[in-house]
Image (cartoon, grey):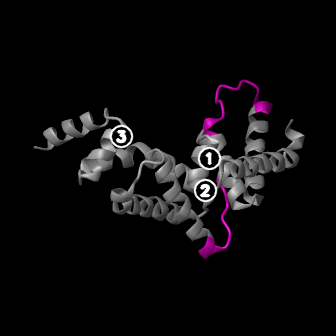
């Protein structure tokens, strides 16, 4: 029986978000599980860059998934399921931020993306030093600027998608992102 379930779950991963959402809205837990497995790592990465406590990150992602399951019948498809999940996650992050008072970004994940094939050790040290400096400067940005920057630069979202997530207009998102880039550019000028 388990092999049949695993084979069925494997087939579900081939379905589009729209088909999975339709099934999940009808109460299909397996379809919702595929959605969670598809976007959970992205949600985790987003929360990890905006919240310092690992346990808070885990709680945020779990609460996001629980809230999404509960709110799924009300999902009106004005955005993609990915954007909708990020919007829920963003609100959970804001809740933690209000409780704690300040959140720090963690750019450790970006270190994994640094090209390990660098031949010159001085370039490798410089890259690590740059990421440390970027992490420190991201910590100093206001939460909305930091979120806009992470969603645009790390997650590759468009301004309209980020607008849905942060509950702002696309122009406001563009402004937040522009200010974040300007502030980071000024602070990291020595790396140019």
Separation of disc 2 and disc 3 at Cα?
A: 23 Å
| Residue 107 lies within the magenta run | yes
The residue positioned 37% from the left and 40% from the top of the image is 17
User: Which labelled disc corresponds to residue 151?
Assistant: 1
The residue positioned 74% from the left and 61% from the top of the image is 142
Indicate the position of residue 176 as horizontal and vertical percent values. 74, 52
Q: Which residue is mark 3?
A: 18
Mark closer to the chain start, 3 or 1: 3
Q: Which residues are magenta?
A: 98-123
User: Which labelled disc corresponds to residue 139?
Assistant: none
Q: Which residue is mark 2?
A: 166
Locate residue 128: give its quadrant: top right
Q: Residue furthest left?
A: 1
Answer whether labels 1 and 2 touch (C-beta < 8 Å): yes
Indicate the position of residue 84 as horizontal and vertical percent values. 47, 52
Judge whether residue 110 can be spotted in this image.
no
Indicate the position of residue 91 as horizontal and vertical percent values. 54, 63
Local SS, label 1? helix
């Amino acid at each position: 029986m388990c092999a049949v379930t695993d084979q069925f779950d494997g087939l579900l991963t081939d379905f589009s978000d729209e088909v999975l959402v339709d099934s999940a809205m009808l109460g299909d837990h397996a379809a919702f599980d595929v959605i969670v497995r598809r976007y959970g790592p992205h949600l985790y990465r987003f929360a990890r860059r905006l919240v310092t406590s690992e346990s808070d990150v885990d709680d945020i992602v779990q609460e996001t998934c629980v809230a999404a399951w509960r709110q799924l019948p009300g999902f009106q498809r004005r955005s993609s399921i990915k954007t909708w999940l990020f919007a829920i996650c963003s609100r959970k992050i804001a809740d933690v931020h209000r409780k704690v008072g300040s959140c720090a970004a963690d750019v450790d994940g970006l270190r994994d993306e640094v090209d390990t094939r660098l031949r010159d050790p001085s370039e490798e040290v410089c890259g690590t030093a740059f990421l440390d400096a970027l992490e420190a400067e991201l910590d100093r940005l206001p939460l909305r600027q930091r979120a806009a920057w992470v969603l645009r630069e790390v997650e590759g979202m468009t301004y309209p998608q980020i607008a849905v997530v942060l509950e702002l207009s696309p122009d406001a998102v563009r402004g937040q992102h522009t200010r974040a880039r300007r502030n980071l550019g000024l602070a990291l000028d020595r790396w140019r």
